[in-house]
Amino acid sequence: MIDSYSDQVMFPRFEAAGYASLGNRDHRRSTSNTFSAASSLARTQGTHTLKFGFEGRMFRSNTRELRSPSGEFRFNTAFTQGPNPLTASSTAGNGLASLLLGTGISGDRLMTQYKDEAAQSFYLAGYAQDDWRVASKLTLNLGLRWDMDTPRTERFDHLNYFDPDVRSPLVIPGLANLRGGLIYQGVDGNSRHQYYWDWHNFAPRVGFAYQATPRTVLRAGYAHVYAASFKGASGTDTPYGFRGETPWISTLDGITPLNLLSNPYPTGLGVPKGSSEGLLSAVGFDFRPKFKDDKVPWAQQWNVTLQRELPGQFMFEVGYVGTRGRELALERYPNQLDPQYMALGSQLNQLVANPFYRHPNAGGILAGPQVARRQLLRPFPQFGELVGARDTGGRSWYNGLVISAKKRLARGLQFEGSYAWSKTLDFGEDTVQNEYDKVASRAVAQTDIPHRFVVSYIYELPFGHGRPWGNTALGVANWLIGGWQVNGITTFQSGLPLAITANNTAGLFNPRTSANNSGQSGKLSVRAQDRLTKWFDTSVFTQPAAFTFGTAGARINDLRAHGARNFDLSLCKEFQAIEKLKVQFRMEALNAFNTVQFSGPNTSVTSSSFGRVSAQANAPRQVQFGLKLLW
């Protein structure tokens, strides 16, 4: 039956926690076209240099992507952990045992027409800038830019969005005033555009350069910068109604098996219904909602820099850089249960009479006579998971001190280096623990690198004819010792912060649960080589009890993976073979001193390898030789 239903017959995907996966779930065949038009005008008038410009693009995305066309079946330890099935640990349960029993993770889906669309959008932008030389020592830069992504349309109007406030036409005993539903584009008088238009993305820029002394310059700047939005055609996926989805409902309460692997789809396979069901679409099913009021991500950026030229062809620079990200992309789970219901504990998993039973539009988790109590307490009890909802509202904060130095080539030596001392915070970058308190997930960003030092250098060795040593060397002697050059790049940087994870036993349909922290730091101040079996103090982190949130942050600032210490070096020389031919010899050593950088440790509190480092992150020393002919 699955073979005749599938877009493309593939071996189903099987995943058992702790074991290698089997099968595939993706197949893509997509293309896109971009048509651009741009113009600019520059005019100098007295002390003003004026610039104006416009850019327009039409973007078309034609996507054909399959996802789990023959089914996806995942198995964790939940159904084989005991004696208490709600308590997770590193010694309870086995993913392969769950597979052999046929008791998998509820919600995996078999899908047809996962992405099958022809979307279109436009990008429009205009700018004006004035570089104003106020005085011989002061220049101002004043500018204004306007950006807009037009809301996308789809050739066949295969689009919809989720309205959380619309009144549902469902009449269900005991569930009065149901809200939420899908609004379809291009029908019932609805616009063909999936999002609201946003005409207000004006981005001012201002900066100045002041020459305090002949060798000292102060620069500063501030700007609003808008990023690409979700409104464009890029990244569109086929919404519910225009794809066929059949969920594997392996359990209703997370404890009691329902549909086993031997017959995962007892009620048959779903087919696309288009917009025919309107606000009665997806009753009992999961879907990925879009929100019509998505904002455009933007950032505030500013910097102040002092540059000073020093004797010996030397340039020194020190500056501060700040960035604040606003309306950044985040992943929402709007059908998460309110944390106040945690007090009900195991009652949340109790099976109760299903008030949606036998309703002609009800399917999925609401198709049977019983349902878990927690389902009926959700904000939108008529739906399953509103999974991975792409929305905006995330934020980020970056502050950095940057010091750099540059030496022009003189006496055979040239180098350029920089050091950055910074901190990056954010929320929304990762899936939050609690949909009702997103700001609580504010933590150091997964890209945070407090210290980073990079220097590149070239040194012409002082040997050979015309050099300090061997100045009179000629012939073979000069051929052997002269003209050698050493090059290199050296990098030192801090490791990335760690996120301590735990099994999700909160019972609220939330996407993740953090570990518990005892209130103490887990940092161990010993050499990396001496803590490979215990990278940090694992005793300060534990699995939260069922129906509770973990207390640890999304990432831990003082627990970090191993930092980088790397030297890439090369030695090269050019030989004059004949009058018009040179031969360049090179020897390059990547990670020249064979310095190890260990990979991050296992960070799952329920893993038997918790806190252990088991691999190397960088490559061992590699030496390579080369000859190049120059003519």
Image (tube, rainbow, N blue to C red):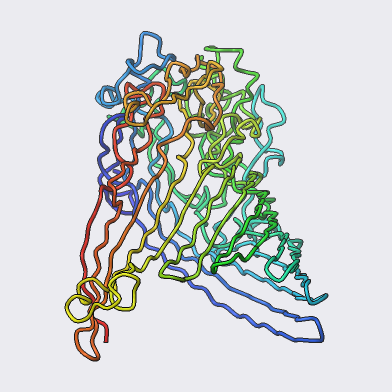
Identified at 71% across, 84% down, the residue is: 42
Q: Nearest the camera: 142 or 603? A: 142
Look at the image and tell me whether residue 360 can be seen. Answer: no
Task: Count the labels in the image.
Answer: 0
Q: Is residue 350 left or right of residue 90?
A: right
Identified at 46% across, 69% down, the residue is: 32
Q: Residue furthest front?
A: 472
Quadrant location of the C terminus in the rendered image = bottom left
Image: 187 above or below 264? below
Q: Nearest the camera: 529 or 377? A: 529
Residue 507, given in percent of the width and then of the height, sits at 52, 21
Q: Residue furthest bottom?
A: 579
Residue 223, given in percent of the width and then of the height, sits at 71, 60
Q: Nearest the camera: 323 or 55? A: 323
Look at the image and tell me whether residue 55 can be seen. Answer: yes
Q: Residue furthest top?
A: 83
Identified at 37% across, 60% down, the residue is: 488
Q: Is residue 107 left or right of residue 69?
A: right
Quarter of image, res 437: top right
Quarter of image, res 459: bottom left
Q: Is residue 7 left or right of residue 501?
A: left
Q: Residue furthest left?
A: 476
Residue 365, given in percent of the width and then of the height, sits at 48, 30
Image: 294 above or below 626? above
Q: Nearest the camera: 511 or 587? A: 587
Residue 277, given in percent of the width and then of the height, sits at 58, 46
